[in-house]
Image (cartoon, rainbow, N blue to C red):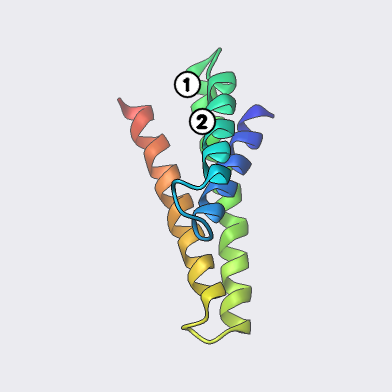
């Protein structure tokens, strides 16, 4: 679904933000892709789309938590891969919170 693709794009942007600066052209492209998918997804039934997006983001968060668990078993607490995994979990949690808040407004 478009909501699933949008959730994947959000995760991709969050992961990318752990590797490049905000003004990097690759980040600008990721943000533009996310915006285009958001426009497409929310063109019709906003309430249903928001609910489906939250579900899709929850699935992405579940995968990110599993990735973080694997990273914590593999690396020392100060390893950059573990910091990246933590940042992805935090970013996806924030994305879900933003969507839930938008749903209330």
Q: Residue at x 38, y 39 (%)?
A: 98
Q: From this viewpoint, which residue is outermost toward the bottom?
A: 76
Whether the residues at callouts 1 and 2 have beta carbons within 8 Å, the answer is yes
| CA distance for labels 1 and 2 | 6 Å
Give the residue number, with chain letter if any, for mark 1: 47
Q: Residue at x 51, y 47 (%)?
A: 24
Answer with the quarter of the image where residue 33 lies.
Answer: top right
Q: Position of residue 100 (x, y in %)?
A: 39, 36
Q: Nearer the viewer, residue 48 or 69?
A: 69
User: In what quadrant of the picture does the N terminus appear?
Assistant: top right
Q: Position of residue 55 (x, y in %)?
A: 56, 39
Which mark is on residue 51?
2
Q: Residue at x 51, y 58 (%)?
A: 88
Q: Position of residue 87 (x, y in %)?
A: 46, 62
Looking at the image, is 17 positioned above or below residue 45?
A: below
Q: Nearer the viewer, residue 76 or 104?
A: 76
Looking at the image, is 100 positioned above or below residue 76?
A: above
* Mark 1 surroundings within 10 Å by alpha-carbon count, few (fewer than 14), some (14 through 19), many (20 or more): few
Which mark is on residue 1?
none
Q: Residue at x 38, y 28 (%)?
A: 103
Looking at the image, is 70 positioned above or below residue 15?
A: below
């Amino acid at each position: 679904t478009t909501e699933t693709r949008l959730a994947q794009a959000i995760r991709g942007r969050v992961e990318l933000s752990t590797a490049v600066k905000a003004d990097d052209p690759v980040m600008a492209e990721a943000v533009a892709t996310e915006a285009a998918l958001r426009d497409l997804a929310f063109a019709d039934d906003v309430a249903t789309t928001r609910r489906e997006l939250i579900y899709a983001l929850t699935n992405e968060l579940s995968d990110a938590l599993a990735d973080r668990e694997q990273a914590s078993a593999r690396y020392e607490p100060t390893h950059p891969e573990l910091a990246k995994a933590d940042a992805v979990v935090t970013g996806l949690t924030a994305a879900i919170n933003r969507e839930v808040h938008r749903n209330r407004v």
